[in-house]
Structure formats: structure tokens, C-alpha cells
Image: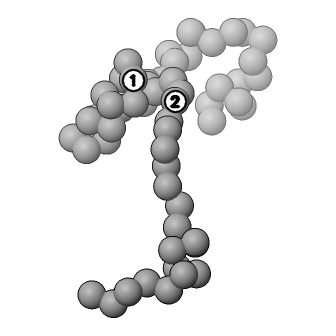
Amino acid sequence: MNPKSEQELLDGVAVIGMAGRFPGAQNVDFFWENLINGRESITFFPPDGLSPLIPSKIKQN
């Protein structure tokens, strides 16, 4: 192993916390499990589940 230079050590990034709302998961740990296991968490609205005030062009996208 080669010792890292001081600059390489200073350039690192550490994720020390994570929070949010994750589809199909009650917390970050379950979300991570979904990712690891390839579980699909995306859901879609049925066409009649959206407000009629939303233009059709947007609903189709």
C-alpha cells in the first residue's frame, strides 16, 4: 500500500447522516435494502387519479 498524500486525505468525502422520505421504505435502512435487492419502489398515478385541472399534456408525461 502506498501512503496517501495529505491532499488526497483532505479531498475525501464522508456521508455521516441521511434522512428523507423514500418510496416503499419506512426508513433509510429499508430503502438501502430495496436498492441492494433491486426492488422497484416507483409508483404511478392512474389517469383518473390526477386533478382534472392538470393539462393532459402534463399527465401524459
> How far is disc 2 from disc 1 in space, using C-alphas?
8 Å
From the viewer's side, name the closer residue of 7 and 39.
7
Residue at 58% of width from left, 72% of height from top? 11
Amino acid type of disc 1? Asn
In-image side of 34 versus 45 (left or right): left
Is residue 54 left or right of 47 when viewed as pictured?
A: right
| The quarter of the displayed image where residue 34 is located | top left
Identify whether 48 is placed above or below 3. Answer: above
Q: Residue furthest bottom?
A: 2
Q: Secondary structure at mark 2?
A: loop
10, 23: nearer the viewer: 10
What residue is shown at x 63% (from left), y 36% (from top)? 61
Q: Badge 1 is on which residue?
A: 27
Q: Which residue is mark 2?
A: 19
Q: Kindly identify the residue that appears in the image at 75 percent across and 18 percent down.
A: 54
Q: Tag 2: residue type?
A: Ala
Q: Residues within 10 Å of mark 2 (few under 14, many from 20)?
A: few
